[in-house]
Structures are given as structure tokens and as C-alpha cells.
Image (cartoon, rainbow, N blue to C red):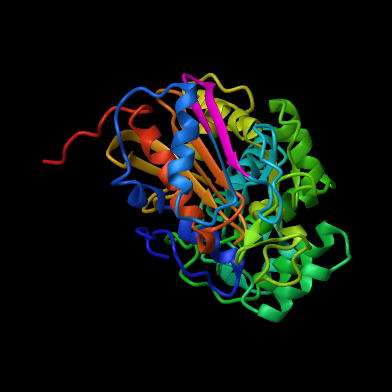
Amino acid sequence: MATTARCSSRWTRQALNASRHLFFGLSLALGTTLSGGALAQSDLDPILAAAMEGTQTPAVAMLVIRDDKVAQQAVRGVRRNDGAVAAQSDDVWLIGSTGKPMTVALIARLAEQGVLDWDAPLSKMLPDLTVINPAYGSVTLTQLLSHRAGLPENLQDAAALDAFFTDSRALPVQREAYIRAALQEAPVNVPGSEFAYSNSGFLIAAVIAERVTGTDFETLMQREVFKPLGMDSAGFGPTAADQPQGHRAGKPVTTAPQKSDDGVPPMYTPAGNLHMRLQDMAKFAIDQMAGSRGKGKLLAPASYRLMQTAQSGSPSAMDWGVQASIAGRKGPVLTHGGSDGNWLAWVALFPETGNGVIAIANAADDMGADKATMGAMGPIFAELAPPAAAKP
């Protein structure tokens, strides 16, 4: 993937690939949507209405953070487009790969506890697996979680990948099987050399955490990230039937995915299969921004710096996209987008000011959710950061 990737209007066969196209696309898409003027709470609803106009997006929700506090929130539309039940401000949404930084935070917690070592090679952490393909033997956790391990984006054997959608084994067993296959595949570049977006790297990191703790990833996330931050609504996999449903091809998705065209398998949680309220997404975002100024409560200052600093020769930190500016506004800014093909989520944070915005839709770009979410965010950006310095 090139570092100038933008939102794709065409899905690949694997919906798992969708987040790759979103990772750096936000600044490019927002360039012409900015407007000035202070925004009151009541102003968000007309912004959402205007952004959704001309799209098939069933619902869009947006939350604005100012000075490390939730300042505004709005939601517009319906939970599913074959009914009339309105989406609510405290509804739960699938957040896609915007959950990847939460996985990194879990690994950071374990590293701070001395359970994991950022710089230990896979040959030490997974000696029984890396012997299969020594090319990955020197890869570290840092490289896995900054997309610099040389791994393909997902398991390349489509049939093997689809089999995980109906696999009934325990999730840690499935993840072990997945990474065993992934580590047999040839690197897409020299491991450790450059950025190549990879969901597989996050699954490998999760298996390492599961092995050293003897605890499944989902329990670890609840214990180490969600509970300390009070993220009470956070959970795994699709939303409940009485919550917003993802949509594809104009219809709500009401059955579990059966293949990679449908979404992501349950064992993919470490790479992005979380659901939660926007307020709980905001708790994590606020802690990340506070942490950059030495005031975070989840991690030590060094862990926040590691998470939020772009790796050498890469636009990616762990797992934030790091930009000097966005849509003409002064950074630094931390960004991420996520989608499983049925949902679309964006996060953009300005750590120096404690400002940020989260937007999410219960559909993806085949129903215009990219236009709706970015159209909603555009007017907000002018209120979150000063203009970027003009280039000489």
C-alpha cells in the first residue's frame, strides 16, 4: 500500500481489506468541506442532515471532543433501513479497525507489567511457529503493530480464510491456526523495512499475549483496557438486534457473516471487530490525548509516546496514522478509519489541544457512508485546530 492511499469506492473480494483504504484517506477527502464559525450543540443535527442528503446511509452518529471532554454529540437516521426505529445517542456501533489502537494499548499494558517485550523477536516469542519461515524470525511486536513486519494484509488462501467464519473452535485456537498459516506465507517486503498494512500482524500479537498470559484476548481487553477506562458498553462482534445494524447493498445485514465478502470472522477481534457506544470510544480517545501530555491514566508516558510516534520511514505509529496537518488544520493529528464493508468509522484527534471528532455510520461507501461521514466531519475541523502554516 502506498502512503498516499485514499478511500476506495470499490471493495475488494475481502471486506477485511477495507480498513487499508481508510487509514490515510481522511485528510484527502476533507479538503473542500471546511467552514468557519462556532458550532453550538443544536448545529450538529443540520450538519448531519446535509451530509446524509443524496446518500443511502441509514444513520450517522458524530461526537466532538473539546478540551479533553465530550462537548457535542448527535445522531440522525434509523437503526435499520427496513424499519422506522430511530438511532439513539447511546446506541452501540461496530467500530472496525478504529479498534486497533485499543489492541496496541493492551499490548502496552502487558509490556509495562513485564509480561511482554516490545523488542523481543518472534523467534523467541513464537519459536515453534517462526521456524516454519525464518524470514519473520527477527520481527518484533513494535513492527507487528506498526505494519512493518512484511506480512501480507490478510491470509492469502481465500478458502482457508473463509473457513474461520464457521469455525466452532475456541477463538484462541482459531487464532493460533490462522497465524500458523499466515507465517508460512512469503513476506510482501523485507520484514522491518517499510509500511505494509496488515491485519495478520495484530492477530499474531494477540496470540503472543494469549500465550504468555494464558488468557484469551477478549478477556484481556476487558481487564486491561475497557474496565480501567470505564468503557462499559464495549464488546465483541456484531451489535445486538435492538441496536443499529450494518448495511450492505441497500439492505440491513442481520445474519452472521459466512465468508470474507460478508464482514470479518469472530476471531478477528484484535484487528477490528469491536462494538461500543461513541461515548466509550471517546473515553479511549480522551485518554490517548491526555497521555500525550503526561496526564493519561491507562499507560505510562513512554507507552503513549510509542503509540503516537510515527515509525522511521513510515506514516504509521501504533496504530495511529500520524499527520502534521489535516484538511488545512494544524496538527499533529492522530487518525484512523475502519470498516468491515457494513459499517464505517473515523477518528481524528489533536492531542496538543485535547480536541477531536468521531464519526460513524451503519453502512459503508457502497451506500454513500463515506460522503455522509466525511461531509459531517468537515465543518467541525475548523473548530478543532488553527490553520496549518502555509507551505513556502
Q: Which residues are magenta?
A: 63-77
Residue 35 position within the rendered picture, expressed as x and y whole percent measured from the top left: 30, 34
Q: Give the residue at x 58% y 56%.
A: 339
Note whether 126 is above or below 209 in the view shown. below
The quadrant where residue 268 appears: bottom right
Q: Which is the main secondary structure of the residues drawn in magenta?
A: strand
Residue 247 position within the rendered picture, expressed as x and y whole percent measured from the top left: 64, 59
Q: Is residue 262 visible to us here?
A: yes
Note whether 304 is above or below 27 in the view shown. above
Is 144 placed left or right of 178 in the picture?
A: left
Is 79 placed left or right of 369 in the picture?
A: right
- In depth, the one of 239 and 127 nearer the eye is 239
- In depth, the one of 310 and 169 nearer the eye is 169
Residue 95 position within the rendered picture, expressed as x and y whole percent measured from the top left: 62, 47
Quadrant where the N terminus is found in the figure: bottom left
Note whether 123 is above or below 244 in the view shown. below
Is 128 placed left or right of 315 in the picture?
A: right
Q: Is residue 309 visible to us here?
A: no
Q: Give the residue at x 81% y 57%.
A: 172
Residue 67 position within the rendered picture, expressed as x and y whole percent measured from the top left: 47, 19
Q: Give the residue at x 51% y 54%.
A: 369
> Furthest-left residue in view?
392
